[in-house]
Amino acid sequence: MARRLEASNLIGKKAEVLKSTNKMYVGFVGKIIFESEKTIVLENLQGERKTFLKSALILIKVDSEEIVCTELFARTFERIRGNA
């Protein structure tokens, strides 16, 4: 069961794409190196970077917890302040 996102910074955390509207994204694992209001950038161990639209990601796994990506439609500082 996926949890609701708590106000936190995801940058630097390991993530895996579990569900996506684009099947090519599923299974990609990497560290979150950038997050904006509409995108997340992951970098894998080989240095390959992929930019994902948050609208295309349905479910990601961060630090062994599943996160519903609709909870990410705000910038990090807006989630922390509670303005999202």
Image: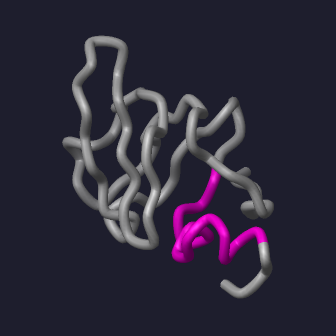
Magenta stretch contains residue 71: yes
Q: How many marks?
A: 0
Give the magenta range: 67-80
Q: Residue at x 52, y 75 (%)?
A: 73
- Relative to 25, say whether 64 is above or below: above
In the visual, does 6 lie left or right of 73? right
Magenta stretch contains residue 79: yes
Give the quadrant of the C terminus.
bottom right
In the visual, does 13 lie left or right of 45? right
Q: Residue at x 22, y 25 (%)?
A: 48
Residue 36 x %, y %: 43, 64
In the visual, does 66 lie left or right of 16? right
- Relative to 79, say whether 15 is above or below: above
Q: Residue furthest toward the bottom?
A: 83
Residue 78 x %, y %: 66, 77
In the visual, does 8 lie left or right of 76? right
Q: Residue at x 25, y 33 (%)?
A: 49
Residue 51 x %, y %: 27, 49
- Relative to 8, say whether 18 is above or below: above
Q: Main secondary structure of the magenta part?
A: helix
Residue 22 x %, y %: 23, 54
Tell me which colouring the rendered structure shows: one colour
> Where is residue 5, by image quadrant?
bottom right
Q: Residue furthest toward the top?
A: 46
Nearest the eye: 39 or 70: 39
> Where is residue 3, by image quadrant?
bottom right
Nearest the eye: 32 or 28: 32
